[in-house]
Image (spheres, rainbow, N blue to C red):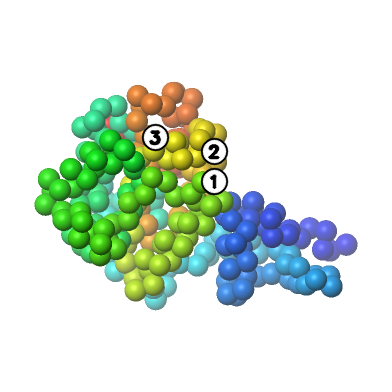
Amino acid sequence: MANSSLLNTREAAQFLRVSEASIRRWSDAGLLAAQRVGRRRERRFAPSDLRRFLENPPGGPGPAAPQATAVNVGGSSVPLRTHLAPIYSSDAGQLRLSIPFLADGLRAQQPCFLVAAGRVLERYLNALTDQRIDVRAAVDGGRLTVMPGPGADVADAISSWERLFGTALAGGPTVLRVAGEMVSERSVFGSEAALMAYEEAYELMAKRFPVVTLCQYDAREFDGQIILRVLKSHPDMFEQHLGGFLN
């Protein structure tokens, strides 16, 4: 039968590496083509429609696109929808790219997101203050969102980012900036395997939004095998000058 090739909601979510809630939301909004089958009128999705969705996702170029098309990261012009993984091996290296990246965004009134906890978070907040950023005002005004992790599991994390990005863009076109300390995120997810699955899902999800993301990896905390997987899950690193993101 022709319908044998159609995917259900769970399978479509796995195909796009997003949550089932996102699939239902896009389908209800008419953004993702779906067929209704059976007495219960359950959703079914054609793989060709899912591939087309990946090529022309919501949030792509159009009237809602922000004026800026790139941001400065460590002296390099980085286009929107770029997902990078700076790797560092010292406390100074940790902040070399991420603090100017966040400070520039906050000064430009762009929504910024910082994923960090504990002493790492304290180091970030002190460094932003040294850059003459009023951190309290930025948080209270909604320009800076600070959290220890985006969600308890991969599906929850991706769904949370979609909500956060959607809310940030509701007021009009803008550039989104994310800096995440992956040691903190690993603690939330509970394992490096879950962390890598999350990175792969985030890579696809983030392409739909005008966001630049720095996933910060401390080489003192992750072994070589994980760092290799990190590079594989951040193909944008190879579009840039890779050495500029190794601290």
Disc number at residue 183? 3
Closer to the chain start, of discs 3 and 2, is: 3
Q: Could you say where residue 173 lies in the image, as x and y percent from the top left?
A: 34, 71
Is the residue marked by circle 3 packed among few (<14), some (14-19), or many (20+) residues within 10 Å? many
Name the residue that disc number 2 marks. 194
**Residue found at the very far right of the displayed protein:** 1
Q: Which of 91 and 190 is in front in this view?
A: 190
Cα distance in 3D space between marks 3 and 2: 13 Å
Is the residue marked by circle 1 packed among few (<14), some (14-19), or many (20+) residues within 10 Å? some
What amino acid type should be assigned to the residue bearing mark 1? Answer: Asp
Q: How many labels does the image show?
A: 3
Left or right, 213 with respect to 244, comes to right
Name the residue that disc number 1 marks. 153
Residue at 56 percent across and 51 percent down: it is 155
Q: Could you say where residue 96 lies in the image, as x and y percent from the top left?
A: 22, 38
Q: Which of 188 and 231 is in front in this view?
A: 188
Left or right, 82 with respect to 33, comes to left
- State which quadrant residue 61 falls in: bottom left
Tag 2 near tag 1, CB within 8 Å:
yes
Q: Could you say where residue 102 lies in the image, as x and y percent from the top left?
A: 25, 51
The quadrant of the rendering that contains the C terminus is: top left
The quadrant of the rendering that contains the N terminus is: bottom right
What amino acid type should be assigned to the residue bearing mark 2? Answer: Ala
Visible residue check, residue 37:
yes
Disc number at residue 97? none
Visible residue check, residue 79:
no
What amino acid type should be assigned to the residue bearing mark 3? Answer: Val
